[in-house]
Image: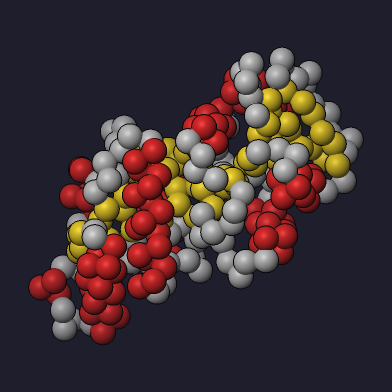
Amino acid sequence: MKIGIGCGVDAAKVVRSAGDAASPDTEIVCYAKTGEELPAPAKGVTLLFSDAPEKALIDDLHAGNIQAAVRGSLPANDTLQYLKSVYAVPRLERIALLETAAGQKFFFAPVGVDEGWTVAEKVSFAEDGRRLARAFGLPEKTVLLSGGRLGDIGRHEAVDKTIRDAEEAALAAGAVHGEILIEDAVKDAGVIIAPDGISGNLIFRTLVFLGGGIGHGALIVNIPDLFVDSSRASAGYAGILAMTKRLMQDKIR
Protein backbone atom coordinates (compact mmCIF):
# COMPACT_ATOMS: atom_id res chain seq x y z
CA MET A 1 0.00 0.00 0.00
CA LYS A 2 1.11 3.55 -0.67
CA ILE A 3 0.06 6.64 1.27
CA GLY A 4 1.02 10.09 0.00
CA ILE A 5 1.52 13.03 2.33
CA GLY A 6 2.17 16.68 1.52
CA CYS A 7 5.26 18.53 2.74
CA GLY A 8 4.76 22.28 2.99
CA VAL A 9 5.56 24.24 6.12
CA ASP A 10 8.12 22.44 8.32
CA ALA A 11 8.53 19.72 5.72
CA ALA A 12 11.23 17.99 7.75
CA LYS A 13 8.65 17.28 10.49
CA VAL A 14 6.44 15.57 7.93
CA VAL A 15 9.30 13.40 6.68
CA ARG A 16 10.20 12.37 10.23
CA SER A 17 6.56 11.50 10.92
CA ALA A 18 6.46 9.44 7.73
CA GLY A 19 9.43 7.45 9.01
CA ASP A 20 7.55 6.73 12.23
CA ALA A 21 4.48 5.54 10.30
CA ALA A 22 6.13 3.49 7.54
CA SER A 23 5.97 -0.31 7.80
CA PRO A 24 6.81 -3.33 5.63
CA ASP A 25 3.34 -3.27 4.09
CA THR A 26 2.93 0.52 3.82
CA GLU A 27 5.15 2.90 1.84
CA ILE A 28 4.85 6.61 2.60
CA VAL A 29 5.46 8.99 -0.30
CA CYS A 30 6.32 12.56 0.76
CA TYR A 31 5.40 15.23 -1.81
CA ALA A 32 7.65 18.27 -1.44
CA LYS A 33 8.50 21.44 -3.31
CA THR A 34 11.34 21.19 -5.82
CA GLY A 35 14.57 22.36 -4.19
CA GLU A 36 13.37 21.73 -0.61
CA GLU A 37 16.18 20.49 1.63
CA LEU A 38 14.92 17.49 3.54
CA PRO A 39 16.48 14.93 5.88
CA ALA A 40 17.36 11.52 4.48
CA PRO A 41 14.16 9.45 4.49
CA ALA A 42 13.79 6.41 6.70
CA LYS A 43 13.22 2.95 5.28
CA GLY A 44 9.82 2.75 3.62
CA VAL A 45 9.68 6.48 2.87
CA THR A 46 10.07 7.96 -0.63
CA LEU A 47 10.60 11.63 -1.46
CA LEU A 48 8.87 13.05 -4.53
CA PHE A 49 9.66 16.61 -5.61
CA SER A 50 7.38 18.82 -7.69
CA ASP A 51 6.91 22.50 -8.49
CA ALA A 52 3.30 22.01 -7.29
CA PRO A 53 3.31 19.23 -4.69
CA GLU A 54 -0.38 19.67 -3.85
CA LYS A 55 -1.28 18.96 -7.49
CA ALA A 56 1.14 16.03 -7.74
CA LEU A 57 -0.32 14.47 -4.58
CA ILE A 58 -3.93 14.79 -5.74
CA ASP A 59 -3.19 13.76 -9.33
CA ASP A 60 -1.48 10.59 -8.09
CA LEU A 61 -4.43 9.80 -5.82
CA HIS A 62 -6.91 10.33 -8.64
CA ALA A 63 -4.81 8.17 -11.00
CA GLY A 64 -4.50 5.35 -8.47
CA ASN A 65 -0.73 5.66 -8.10
CA ILE A 66 -1.24 5.95 -4.34
CA GLN A 67 -4.12 4.42 -2.37
CA ALA A 68 -4.60 7.31 0.06
CA ALA A 69 -3.48 10.90 0.55
CA VAL A 70 -2.94 13.14 3.58
CA ARG A 71 -2.71 16.92 3.20
CA GLY A 72 0.10 17.08 5.75
CA SER A 73 1.47 20.60 5.94
CA LEU A 74 0.49 21.76 2.45
CA PRO A 75 -1.51 25.04 2.36
CA ALA A 76 -5.21 24.37 2.89
CA ASN A 77 -6.68 26.73 0.30
CA ASP A 78 -4.61 25.66 -2.71
CA THR A 79 -4.78 21.97 -1.86
CA LEU A 80 -8.50 21.73 -1.14
CA GLN A 81 -9.49 23.96 -4.05
CA TYR A 82 -7.54 21.70 -6.42
CA LEU A 83 -9.06 18.61 -4.81
CA LYS A 84 -12.55 20.01 -5.45
CA SER A 85 -11.73 20.74 -9.08
CA VAL A 86 -10.24 17.29 -9.79
CA TYR A 87 -13.18 15.45 -8.22
CA ALA A 88 -15.75 17.94 -9.55
CA VAL A 89 -17.54 18.57 -6.23
CA PRO A 90 -18.87 22.01 -5.18
CA ARG A 91 -17.64 21.61 -1.59
CA LEU A 92 -15.80 19.10 0.56
CA GLU A 93 -17.55 17.29 3.40
CA ARG A 94 -15.23 16.27 6.25
CA ILE A 95 -15.67 14.15 9.36
CA ALA A 96 -12.91 14.60 11.94
CA LEU A 97 -11.71 12.13 14.54
CA LEU A 98 -11.28 14.18 17.71
CA GLU A 99 -9.96 13.36 21.15
CA THR A 100 -10.61 15.35 24.31
CA ALA A 101 -7.88 16.17 26.82
CA ALA A 102 -9.30 13.32 28.93
CA GLY A 103 -8.80 10.83 26.08
CA GLN A 104 -12.41 10.52 24.86
CA LYS A 105 -12.50 9.93 21.09
CA PHE A 106 -15.42 10.67 18.78
CA PHE A 107 -16.13 11.48 15.15
CA PHE A 108 -17.28 15.04 14.61
CA ALA A 109 -18.81 17.08 11.79
CA PRO A 110 -19.13 19.54 10.22
CA VAL A 111 -15.70 21.15 10.54
CA GLY A 112 -15.85 23.46 7.52
CA VAL A 113 -17.85 26.71 7.65
CA ASP A 114 -19.70 25.86 4.42
CA GLU A 115 -20.71 22.34 5.53
CA GLY A 116 -23.69 20.86 7.37
CA TRP A 117 -26.26 23.60 6.91
CA THR A 118 -29.19 21.48 5.71
CA VAL A 119 -31.10 18.63 7.32
CA ALA A 120 -30.04 16.34 4.45
CA GLU A 121 -26.38 17.14 5.06
CA LYS A 122 -26.75 16.45 8.79
CA VAL A 123 -28.35 13.08 8.06
CA SER A 124 -25.57 12.21 5.63
CA PHE A 125 -22.91 13.16 8.20
CA ALA A 126 -24.67 11.07 10.85
CA GLU A 127 -24.77 8.00 8.62
CA ASP A 128 -21.14 8.34 7.48
CA GLY A 129 -20.01 9.06 11.03
CA ARG A 130 -21.76 5.97 12.39
CA ARG A 131 -20.04 3.82 9.76
CA LEU A 132 -16.65 5.28 10.75
CA ALA A 133 -17.36 4.80 14.45
CA ARG A 134 -18.19 1.15 13.83
CA ALA A 135 -14.93 0.62 11.93
CA PHE A 136 -12.90 2.24 14.73
CA GLY A 137 -14.63 0.41 17.56
CA LEU A 138 -16.28 3.56 18.92
CA PRO A 139 -19.91 3.74 20.11
CA GLU A 140 -22.38 4.04 17.25
CA LYS A 141 -24.57 6.37 19.29
CA THR A 142 -24.97 9.54 17.24
CA VAL A 143 -25.96 12.87 18.77
CA LEU A 144 -27.11 15.93 16.82
CA LEU A 145 -26.59 19.20 18.64
CA SER A 146 -28.73 22.32 18.33
CA GLY A 147 -28.42 25.92 19.44
CA GLY A 148 -30.40 25.50 22.65
CA ARG A 149 -32.52 23.31 24.89
CA LEU A 150 -36.09 22.41 23.96
CA GLY A 151 -37.17 24.84 26.65
CA ASP A 152 -35.45 27.65 24.75
CA ILE A 153 -37.90 27.50 21.85
CA GLY A 154 -39.33 30.96 21.28
CA ARG A 155 -36.31 32.89 22.54
CA HIS A 156 -34.88 33.48 19.05
CA GLU A 157 -35.92 32.32 15.59
CA ALA A 158 -32.37 31.23 14.69
CA VAL A 159 -32.23 29.00 17.78
CA ASP A 160 -35.67 27.61 17.00
CA LYS A 161 -34.53 26.60 13.51
CA THR A 162 -31.49 24.71 14.81
CA ILE A 163 -33.74 22.80 17.22
CA ARG A 164 -36.29 21.94 14.51
CA ASP A 165 -33.52 20.85 12.12
CA ALA A 166 -31.79 18.70 14.74
CA GLU A 167 -35.08 17.03 15.70
CA GLU A 168 -35.88 16.28 12.05
CA ALA A 169 -32.36 15.04 11.24
CA ALA A 170 -32.18 12.88 14.37
CA LEU A 171 -35.49 11.21 13.50
CA ALA A 172 -34.38 10.56 9.90
CA ALA A 173 -30.96 9.23 10.91
CA GLY A 174 -32.03 7.13 13.88
CA ALA A 175 -29.95 9.41 16.08
CA VAL A 176 -30.49 11.45 19.25
CA HIS A 177 -31.13 15.18 19.56
CA GLY A 178 -28.75 16.21 22.31
CA GLU A 179 -29.91 19.83 22.37
CA ILE A 180 -26.95 22.15 23.20
CA LEU A 181 -25.44 19.77 25.77
CA ILE A 182 -22.18 18.76 24.09
CA GLU A 183 -20.71 18.03 27.53
CA ASP A 184 -23.23 15.19 27.91
CA ALA A 185 -22.98 13.99 24.33
CA VAL A 186 -19.25 13.36 24.55
CA LYS A 187 -19.74 10.93 27.46
CA ASP A 188 -21.17 8.07 25.41
CA ALA A 189 -21.51 9.12 21.75
CA GLY A 190 -19.09 8.01 19.06
CA VAL A 191 -20.50 10.57 16.61
CA ILE A 192 -21.44 14.19 17.32
CA ILE A 193 -22.94 16.52 14.71
CA ALA A 194 -22.79 20.28 15.29
CA PRO A 195 -25.71 22.59 14.35
CA ASP A 196 -23.86 24.09 11.37
CA GLY A 197 -20.43 24.64 9.86
CA ILE A 198 -19.62 27.79 11.83
CA SER A 199 -20.34 26.30 15.24
CA GLY A 200 -18.63 23.07 14.19
CA ASN A 201 -15.48 24.91 13.19
CA LEU A 202 -15.51 26.83 16.47
CA ILE A 203 -15.98 23.64 18.51
CA PHE A 204 -13.11 21.97 16.64
CA ARG A 205 -10.79 24.92 17.15
CA THR A 206 -11.72 25.35 20.81
CA LEU A 207 -11.11 21.69 21.59
CA VAL A 208 -7.87 21.30 19.66
CA PHE A 209 -6.20 24.70 19.96
CA LEU A 210 -7.43 25.88 23.35
CA GLY A 211 -8.70 22.84 25.21
CA GLY A 212 -5.75 20.48 25.01
CA GLY A 213 -7.55 18.05 22.70
CA ILE A 214 -6.20 16.30 19.62
CA GLY A 215 -7.35 16.32 16.00
CA HIS A 216 -6.51 12.99 14.37
CA GLY A 217 -7.38 14.16 10.87
CA ALA A 218 -10.61 14.57 8.92
CA LEU A 219 -11.77 12.13 6.25
CA ILE A 220 -13.37 13.72 3.19
CA VAL A 221 -16.49 11.65 2.69
CA ASN A 222 -17.93 12.98 -0.58
CA ILE A 223 -15.20 11.85 -2.99
CA PRO A 224 -14.57 8.24 -4.07
CA ASP A 225 -10.90 8.12 -3.03
CA LEU A 226 -9.36 8.30 0.45
CA PHE A 227 -8.15 11.79 1.33
CA VAL A 228 -7.51 12.85 4.93
CA ASP A 229 -7.30 16.53 5.75
CA SER A 230 -4.91 17.65 8.49
CA SER A 231 -3.75 20.81 10.20
CA ARG A 232 -0.38 22.44 9.65
CA ALA A 233 -0.39 23.13 13.39
CA SER A 234 -0.15 19.41 14.19
CA ALA A 235 2.72 18.39 16.46
CA GLY A 236 3.35 15.44 14.15
CA TYR A 237 1.65 13.34 11.50
CA ALA A 238 2.34 9.75 12.56
CA GLY A 239 -1.08 9.47 14.23
CA ILE A 240 -2.88 10.86 11.18
CA LEU A 241 -0.99 8.44 8.93
CA ALA A 242 -1.94 5.58 11.26
CA MET A 243 -5.60 6.63 11.02
CA THR A 244 -5.30 6.71 7.23
CA LYS A 245 -3.82 3.21 7.18
CA ARG A 246 -6.69 1.99 9.34
CA LEU A 247 -9.20 3.49 6.92
CA MET A 248 -7.45 1.74 4.04
CA GLN A 249 -7.44 -1.61 5.82
CA ASP A 250 -11.14 -1.32 6.65
CA LYS A 251 -11.86 -0.36 3.03
CA ILE A 252 -13.65 2.83 4.11
CA ARG A 253 -12.71 4.19 0.68
Coordinates of residue 51 in the picture (x, y in percent): 87, 46
Q: Is residue 191 left or right of residue 20?
A: left
Coordinates of residue 201 in the picture (x, y in percent): 44, 58
- Identify the image quadrant of the N terminus: top right
Identified at 83% across, 48% down, the residue is: 52
> Which image quadrant is residue 172 in?
bottom left
In the displayed structure, would residue 109 be above or below residue 64?
below
Identified at 71% across, 64% down, the residue is: 85
Identified at 26% across, 41% down, the residue is: 139
Q: Is residue 166 visible in the rendered structure shown here?
A: no
Q: Residue furthest front?
A: 251
Q: How many labels does the image show?
A: 0
Residue closer to the observer: 73 or 86: 86
In the displayed structure, would residue 199 be above or below residue 151?
above
In the displayed structure, would residue 243 be above or below residue 121?
above
Identified at 51% across, 54% down, the residue is: 221
Residue closer to the observer: 66 or 83: 66
> Which image quadrant is residue 253 in?
top right
Coordinates of residue 181 in the picture (x, y in percent): 20, 57
> Which image quadrant is residue 43 in?
top right
Q: In this view, does 204 lie to the left or right of 65?
A: left
Q: Is residue 150 visible in the rendered structure shown here?
A: yes
Residue closer to the observer: 29 or 157: 29
